[in-house]
Amino acid sequence: MPVKVAQRSPAASPAVAQTLRPPFQPLPYLLLLPSLALIFIIEFYPFINGVSFSFHKGTLLGTGAFVGLGNYLRLFNSPTFYNSLWFSFIFAFFNVLVSYVLGLALALFLNLDFPGRGFCRVALLVPWIVPAVVSIVSWKWLIADRGGLVNIILDSFGVGPIYFLSQSGWAMVAVIVIKIWRSFPFMMLSLLAALQVIDKSLYEAGRIDGATNWQLFRHITLPHIKNISIIQAILMIIWSINDFETPFLLTQGGPSSATENLILLSYRYTFGRNDVGLGSAVAILTLIILLVLSTIMMRQQGKST
Amino acid sequence: MIKPNRKWLLLLVGLVIVFIVDFPIITVILNSFRTTETIVSSHSILPTEPTLANYLFINTRTHFWTFLLNSIIVAFASSALAIVLSALAGFAMSRYRARILGGYNQALLIVQMFPLILAIIPLFIFFRNLNLVNNFIPVIMVYTVTQLPFATWMLRSYFDNIPRELDEAATMDGCSPLRAFLQIILPLTVPGIMAVAIFSFLFSYNEFFISSVFLRDENRMTMPVGIQSFMQQYSTDWGSLMASATLGMVPTLILFFFIQKYMVAGATAGAVKG
């Protein structure tokens, strides 16, 4: 395999490589070796095992008989699986949608020039940076049935109480709202970074031509943040589907599986019901969904560069 | 130009938004200084009779300090390991062109999206057979791998900013490429590397899922797992829960303060560098 020191000008490099034919350099391979070894042990080897588990009956103590696609067929005939698939989908959908709208609004706000905006930017990142378990302790009290702040306020208006964590609909709302609260700062931060590199003179030129604020936003701001928006949105969908902490810490997937996403389902099958085959099959299906989403993301990155 | 009055109005709006967004965190801190009875019965959120009772309780009656120490050990080890591995890989990606490097970049993208539950099931069985459940080693290894994509892309971009002529000149003078990297490029990128190290420390310190699978013994639990076990034991003892949550986020907030100016670059690393 030809290896050569990177050239400054990519256009000239293929010709240079052909004429010089540099000797094989082992160094780049050696530099990657430790990382590759660890990725192999921690993700690749378990992945191969996981594929095999998903075709077998099995418990945490040992693998049982080969069942072919049996585990997958059981999932496709189980309402629990479709329930988790559905919850994963709406969880990701609302999280990315609301986080994007909130994140964009706040990024536009922080992009204005006013004293103390540095402080505001840092303070708005706090929900994203604190440990999930700390946020959940806090929110669990806010929405608690007895003595929780939200229900105390509702009570003073003569409404409620709302049992947020024991009614399916409200539990879903609570999990999604808390996830949005935890993830919009990241969206805000990346959109702010994109806004800050837009050339200010474009807006001045637009104003001279008599463009309205909406037209400036529509024709200058939006095209400049389009690529980062699409990429961050897909990244956030992937992270939402992979989220274990928010639903697990808040509701453990309940009440009656209303907030059980695919990751929690796989966890419950494996560690709760000791059914490693079924748990692995859920995990493999999740991987397939994520791979499809990532492929779309990589296509998009290819287009944008 | 924005008129002076409008500037102060914007600041006011900003502070109101900050108050609303950070309200849950503010209540955790305020409630940690109130007894559970006052938290549940009082209609004010301000501690009218501040007390340290909750802190005394978690200091004397729980393993909180063990949890904190365990978290620091695990986060420190995994961020150190992640930095070493991603500095080597980032250097290769910044200075060389080979087919394997493109492949490695794709591998990092897959690592970034990989559903960890899929790895955790076989790894749990694997490490239990090695008698390494309730041991920090599996947790540190998994954390390191999850940090690799972000850390490698960030470090690579720092190395890319160091002019190639510097290490080429050193190589010309008879220095090996690896020595040129260690003695010339690395010292020039120390501030960036520190920021990435703190980022990766924070991710590991905050992480709950992997620790909860591998660290089940009370003497081995990390801080998030420990607080979750409090949630199950003392589910309505809000005072103690709030005090442990407040103490648990102190290291996070301090480290966050040091690296917040690097945050913008960090937030876009995964998207732009991939």
Image (cartoon, coloured by chain):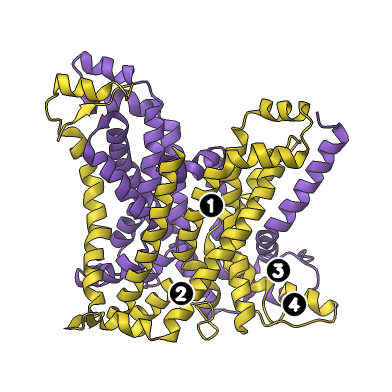
Residue B51 place in picture, x, y as percent: 70, 66
- CA–CA distance between discs 2 and 1? 33 Å
Question: What residue is at 70 percent from the left and 30 percent from the top?
Answer: A203
Chain painted yellow: A
Is residue A92 at least partly visible in the picture? yes
Q: Amino acid at mark 2?
A: Leu
Task: Measure the alpha-carbon separation of dots 4 and 3.
Answer: 19 Å
Read off the residue under disc 2. A85
Q: How many marks?
A: 4
Residue that carries the numbered disc 4 in the rendered image = A151
Q: Which circle, 2 or 4, is nearer the viewer? A: 2
Q: Which residue is the site of mark 3?
A: B34
Q: Secondary structure at mark 4?
A: helix
Location of the N terminus of chain B by quadrant is: top right
x then y, percent, for residue B115: 37, 63
Residue shown at the point (40%, 29%) measured from the top left: B189
Q: Are marks 1 and 4 on the same chain?
A: no
Q: Which mark is residue B252?
A: 1
The amino acid marked with disc number 3 is Arg
Report helix, strand or loop for mark 2.
helix
Depth-wise, is mark 3 or mark 1 nearer the camera?
A: 1
Asked if residue A68 lies left or right of residue B214, the reply is: left
Tell me the shade of chain B.
Answer: purple
- Residue B45 rendering spot, x and y as whole percentages: 77, 66
